[in-house]
Amino acid sequence: MTSVLLIEDDPLVRRSLELALGRYGYAIRTSATGEEGLAALAQEPPDLVVLDLMLPGIDGFEVCRRLRVDSQAPVIMLTARGDDLDVVGGLEAGADDYVIKPVQPAVLDARIRAVLRRAVSDPDGVRAHRGLRIDTESLTVTLGGTPIPLTPTELRLLLTLSRSPGRVFSRQQLLEEVWEHGYLGDSRLVDNGIMRLRGKIEGDPSRPEFIQTVRGFGYRFGPV
């Protein structure tokens, strides 16, 4: 059973999502504050975290940043506002996806399943590009022999791009393949995902060696 840690301060929202996601078959633990959520995460790591941004004490942005120090658990953030500052801030803090409150349980269930599917792909062996090795069977990535911990979203993004070196993927194509979104307005998911991935596999993210920006089109994988 997939375990989900729900960090939400509103008792009505917390209880309603706990009941609804439980009916979808998830094992739900809940926390009312960021501090409680981080303690629960350290005590027993969940398969996925659903994180409200507006929390008392440390907010959801800071919770996500602290969580990302030593956890690769996927994070879906809940935000009451769909403005760019909230969404981009959450994605830059390390979230994998976002939903706008109020959210229908069916929508949240679909997003959870999509995030958890992201690490799954058809294995085709080891892809080696200079010091970067991507093992598509063990789903591990090393750079210069050092393991690189990636979230499921970052791994799926790297697997998708490296599947066809030199091919240009538009943001729309990446949204559909990696995030399973069809709405082009969510292209900030792609840009922030690329930024975080570059931060882990590129020696100098401002001068990327592996993931190139093709201005006006999208991104391609190809060592330069």
Image (cartoon, rainbow, N blue to C red):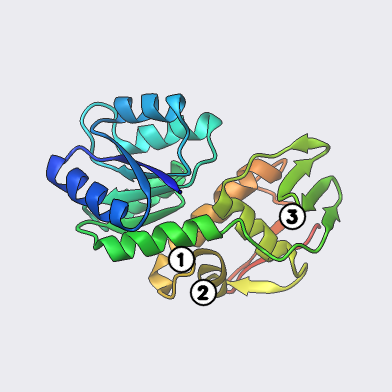
Q: Residue at x 78, y 52 (%)?
A: 135
- In the figure, 42 relative to 189: above or below? above
- Is residue 16 in view from this perspective? yes
CA gap between label 3 and label 1 equals 20 Å
The residue under label 2 is 172
Where, quadrant-wise, is the C terminus in this rendering? bottom right
What element does badge 1 sit on?
helix
Under mark 2, the amino acid is Gln
Q: Mark 2 or mark 3: name the one nearer the start of the chain.
A: 2
Say which mark, if any, is on residue 210. 3
Badge count: 3
User: Does the CB distance between marks 2 and 3 fall below 8 Å?
Assistant: no
**In this rendering, position of residue 197 left or right of residue 28:** right
Q: Mark 2 or mark 1: name the one nearer the start of the chain.
A: 2
Q: Quadrant of residue 43?
A: top left
The residue under label 1 is 187
Instruction: Looking at the picture, tell me which residue is in the foreground, 156 or 39.
Output: 39
Under mark 3, the amino acid is Phe
Q: Quadrant of residue 84?
A: bottom left
**In this rendering, position of residue 213 left or right of residue 186:** right
Instruction: Looking at the picture, tell me which residue is in the foreground, 145 or 14.
Output: 14
User: Does the CB distance between marks 2 and 1 fall below 8 Å?
Assistant: yes
Under mark 1, the amino acid is Ser
CA gap between label 2 and label 3 equals 20 Å
